[in-house]
Image (cartoon, rainbow, N blue to C red):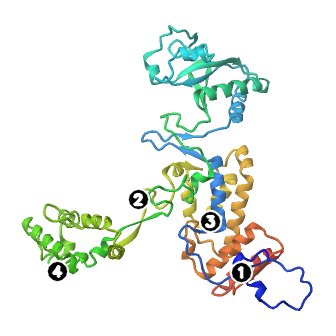
Amino acid sequence: MESLSTYARQFLDRLDKPDVDDIRHVLPAIAMEQKNRVKNARSTVGTATEIVDFLRLLYSGIGQHVCPEVGCGLINRFNTTAELVKAITDLPSGSKVVLTAPVRRTKVKPYPKQLLADGYFRFFNRDTAMVEDITPQTKWPNDEALRPLPIVIDRLVLRGADTSDRLSESVQKALALSGGRVELIFMDRPDAPLVLMTRFDCDRCDRKFPELTPQLFSFNSPLGACPTCEGFGRIIGLDLDKVIPNKQATLKDGVVHPFNTPANVELQDMLLAEAKRRKIPTNKPYAELSEEQKRFVLEGGDDYPGVYPFFRWLERKKYKVHVRVMLAKYRGYYECHHCGGSRLKPEALQVQIHGKTIHDCCGWPIAELKTFIEALETGPTPLPSETLALTRRIRREIINRCQVLLDVGLGYLTLSRQTRTLSGGESQRIHLSAALGTALTETLYVLDEPTVGLHAQDTDRLMDVLVALRD
């Protein structure tokens, strides 16, 4: 009863009551038809199997920002406060260091008076390599307007874990003052400071990065979807193959199809008149015209408006039904030029794991994706043990779900494949693998001829999956 919709329940009272007193142990049922009912353009193999959800968790947890600035390309890894403290305590014991907060000069805060009022009395002078007092008369070096000022937070001798409590407090102060950056200056080599960050910007060129969250890698979220195509990967625009269907036709023959209608015959006359004035041959096939002459046909000039301006004018008249009908005749879908079909913002595509973005992972066949995830632990360059421990469950879920898809004979699919383009059998096996991945128990699955169209080898593997689902 609880599984029925409110609309369906209203008809139950009209039915004759069965001649039974009690019905028990009726399992909730899930029907898997031999047809694809998915029409949503946002649904993909990755979303249907939930593999892409785990990929988002993986990239938001251990992904590294690769700076896209020309000439930079620095790989930036951002840490928690606890990770920063551990990184400092792991340094050689006995090292004399000055823990500073790099702060930029701004017109909003009148340095140095504001620093003194906030309780900060010393800074590290890079020119003299010494810690100096801040006074109202302090003369800052000229280039400090561009470089951050290393405000001294603490001076200490590292003693491993014995200094972790003191370090934790000092690091938190430095992060709060600088906005997420700690600069550790070694007194024996002050020209080579150690920079540690929790904020999201490039250490080399100060480019800002967004915080890594699963929503950043989701094309169904405003935080991650490409602003141009809104997460669809395609945009609708003018299809020149429909506007000029016959490239062998001449200008005189009416090569521009929409100009051949009675309502737009005047545009055809304007095209021929302007072409004659510009000495463009009107009896020559369009395909043989020069690029400049083709550009004239499309963009127009002088007394001829052109194809593109004509359709832009129609866009302003879309409130009329017949105009919308005409525009629909000459439109087509194209890969989004902004995201390259990835559906994601550029910020999400700058995050990599072993040099691969989440879009790369979604474009691989399932078998190749499974190999990549396994190589994060067993490959020639495995991730650090701490990172592996952090992502063990996520990686296991991805590998298990990929293996189920391989077992049902769908290893050739990619996660970016739209669900609505799958055949009925493929769609049924996708939902079957998703059900197996969720590990539901006490559930009745009703399958509509699941082996139709399968090779004998694939049938055996499908039976193994069904047995695993039963057990």
Could you say which disc has been placed on residue 47 in the image? 3
Residue depicted at 33% across the width and 71% down the height: 239
Task: Look at the picture and state if 72 lies above or below 43.
Answer: above
Q: Position of residue 359 (x, y in %)?
A: 54, 58
- Residue picked out by circle 4: 253
Does dot 3 land on a helix, a strand or a loop?
A: helix
Q: Please report whichever mark, 2 or 3, sits nearer to the chain's N-terminal start.
A: 3
State the image quarter where residue 159 is shown. Answer: top right
Label 2, label 3: how far apart the Cα atoms are: 23 Å
Residue labelled with disc 1: 8
Residue plotted at (69% across, 34% down): 81
For image coordinates 53% across by 15% down, the residue present is 112
Question: Residues under labels 4 and 2: Cα distance?
Answer: 34 Å
The image position of residue 303, as x and y in percent, is 13, 64
Check residue 312 in the rendering and tell me which mark sits there, or answer none: none
Placement of 115 over or under 344, stated as above or below: above
Q: Earlier in the sequence, mark 3 or mark 4?
A: 3
Q: CA distance from mark 4 to mark 1?
A: 61 Å
Residue 80, given in percent of the width and then of the height, sits at 67, 37
Q: Earlier in the sequence, mark 1 or mark 3?
A: 1
> Mark 2 Cα within 10 Å, few/some/many (few <14, many 20+)?
few
Q: From the image, tell me which residue sits under label 2.
A: 337
* Number of other residues with Cα within 10 Å of mark 3, as a class: few under 14, some 14 to 19, many 20 or more: some
Q: Amino acid at mark 4?
A: Asp
Mark before the other along the chain sequence, 4 or 2: 4
Quadrant showing the N terminus:
bottom right
For the residue marked with disc 1, what is the amino acid?
Answer: Ala
